[in-house]
Amino acid sequence: MDNDNRQLTDVFKELQQTRMQYENENKKKTKKIYTSNSNNSKKTLTISIILIFLVILILFTIIGAGSISAKDDSVKLYSPETGKKDSISIEINRHRLNAHNIITSNAALETVKQQVIEEKEIPFETLYTERSILPKDEEVVLQEGVNGKKNVTFVRSYINNELSEEIILKEEKTLDYLPQIIDKGTSEFLFKIKAHLNDTLYLTDNSTLYEAMETSSNIIANIPKFLDIKLLDLPNEDWCKVSYDGIEGFLATKNLTSAKISPTMPEKCRIKKILLKLDKTMPLNHSSGLNLNDFKKIFTGLSNDTENIIYNNYEVFYNVDKKYNINGIFLASMAIHESNWGTSQIAKDKKNLFGYGSYDDTPYESSYEFEDYKDSIELVAKVLVKYYLNPAGTKIYDGEYALATYYNGPTVADVNIRYASDTTWNEKVYSYMEMLYKRLE
């Protein structure tokens, strides 16, 4: 019979033998070191008593459970009714408790309880505020969240150094958390054009700046297509408060876009502002504000410039514009008018695009001769700046000051008074200016 099917009496005998052997060994040890180890004898007695108690407890458990161990499936018992022994079937418990194994395994367990205090973080809370002045779903953190602190007291149970149970006894807060505060956008309009307050926006059509958020209110200004405004506020999705050329008012949002959505708008706005300044009364004693590419664009493909004389000198006109603070387009318009697009005899023979020095009775003979067109362009620019376009005492180029010998004003009509005998000269020159400027569109 294997160990699992041993009789309870056998188990008990084994336990007694183990106990007696254990006591005999202790007695031998006690004889040798009795005087120095009396305390160990007391411990041995205590262990023996515990073992006996465990054995008795196990016996009662087995008997109380009603488990019956037998070799056969049936036994014969005397029956008063029949007057003889009858066979009675009794269920055999084939899974009996192995008391030895139970005692051995439990004796090997080491249970430890430990109380500890640990600092834990308290996660911060996030608070959201809906904002109509932010693009939809965009979030702006107004305040960063900071976790709080707390002391937590635990009781932890370990079996053979492995955590088996953890119980929280108490929690004590030592530092409050700081909530994170976030603004969350709701504006469909700002989301659509990818813009924010204080951004520069552009008009996709001619628009009206009103005093209030209704078309029946007073009109402050009419703003041409392509011009820019600064977005100040967004009271609702249909109206916005803006600043245009230093004037504040309200615009309908339907005609607004941004550079992110319309990348060509800034350039169109720049050109539009230049063209808006084009006027017969515009001052010519200032740079045109155009860049080199603008000059190249203006002078490229001019149908009447058959010899490409004007085109070949576009960079010269640009440099003079910047160096001498004179409108280069005005200067080029003078050259076109005076030389008939560079085809006049004086222009061809003497590289003189302006007929500079000519008198009415001897135009060819009295005109100046230059080595190239650049020299004639630069000389006429310096003469106009020094004698015609600026008031006396105006600081001009190379540390010099304007003499204003023939000064009547800075416009093309003012120059006409002392520069040309033809009273319609200014109108002819301005017509060329207008044509050249509009090539920027």
Image: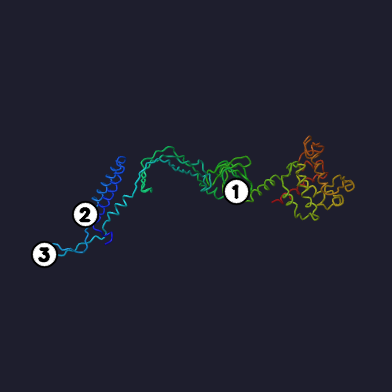
Percent position of residue 171, x then y? 38, 40
| Residues marked 1 and 2 touching at CB (< 8 Å) | no
Query: To which residue does mark 2 refer?
Result: 63
Mark 3, residues whose alpha carbon is within 10 Å: few (<14), some, or many (≥20)? few
The secondary element bearing badge 3 is classed as strand
Whole-percent x, y for residue 397 in the image: 79, 39
Q: CA distance from mark 2 to mark 3?
A: 28 Å
Amino acid type of the residue tagged 3 in the rendering: Lys
Q: Quadrant of residue 92?
A: bottom left
Q: Is residue 106 above or below residue 82?
A: above
Q: CA distance from mark 3 to mark 1?
A: 113 Å
Q: Which residue is mark 3?
A: 84
The label number, if any, that marks residue 374 in the structure image: none
Say which residue label 1 marks. Answer: 258
Q: Secondary structure at mark 1?
A: loop
The amino acid type found where label 1 is placed reads Ser
Label 1 and label 2: CA atoms lie apart by 92 Å
Q: Nearer the viewer, mark 3 or mark 1?
A: 3
Dot 1 or dot 2, earlier in sequence: 2
Along the polypeptide, which appears first: circle 2 or circle 3? Answer: 2
Residue type, label 2: Ile
> Tag 1: Cα neighbours inside 10 Å, few (<14), some, or many (≥20)?
many
